[in-house]
Image: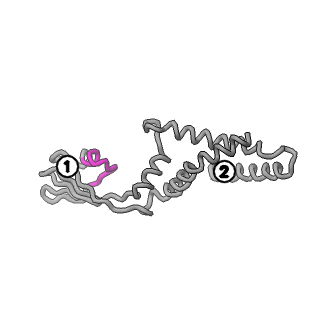
Amino acid sequence: MRIVHRYLGFFLAGIMAVYSLSGIVLIFRDTDFLKQEKLVTKQVALGMDAKDLGEALKIRQLKVQKEAGDLVYFENGTYDKRTGEAAYTTKELPSVLDKMTHLHKAKSSDPLYFLNIFFGLSLFFFVISSFWMFMPKTAIFRKGIYFTIGGIVLTLILLFV
């Protein structure tokens, strides 16, 4: 158990670093922290209403602020009903951080979702195998059990408070 724990830990060191960094970045996903502005121009259908425009541009809850002739103004952008051109700005993470956060949030429809399952199972293995690192009758093991109980209590507090 110790040998598997050791070498699996070495093998997964890179992906654990990616998950820890992307997890920290995801905490700030509701802010503009580390995000860069990007100008987007898209050609969409002519004469769209706000609902259809939001769907075409993949902007949730798009709200029209004002209309002036054929020009529709919405938050961070405009849409020309006559030409079908929409221009708006988005805020995105730098490419590497964006890829890391997408890996962190993988869904079953993503092509490599099984790697996330493997990683999750590996982390669970680390939890279980850590109890085989020391003999049960040693002081280190007993101290480890106290820390485990403390960690479980802290987790329960975080979940239910």
Residue 37's x, y, as percent? 34, 62
For residue 155, the mark is: 2
**125 or 45: nearer the eye?**
125
Looking at the rendered image, the disc whose residue lies closer to the viewer, 2 or 1, is 1
Apparent side of residue 38 relative to residue 66 in the rendered image (left or right): right
Which residues fall within the magenta stretch?
53-63
Which of the two discs, 2 and 1, labels the residue nearer the N terminus? Answer: 1
Identify the residue at image location x=18%, y=52%: 85
What distance separates the C-alpha of mark 2 from that of mark 1?
49 Å
Magenta run includes residue 61: yes
Please name the amino acid that badge 2 sits on.
Thr
Instruction: Examine the rendered structure and indicate whether residue 72 appears above or below residue 55.
Output: below
- Colour mapping used in the image: one colour
Q: In which image quadrant can residue 33 be found?
A: bottom left
Rendered location of residue 29, percent (x, y): 45, 56
C-beta proximity under 8 Å, tags 2 and 1: no
Q: Read off the residue under disc 1.
A: 43
How many numbered dots are placed on residues in this image?
2
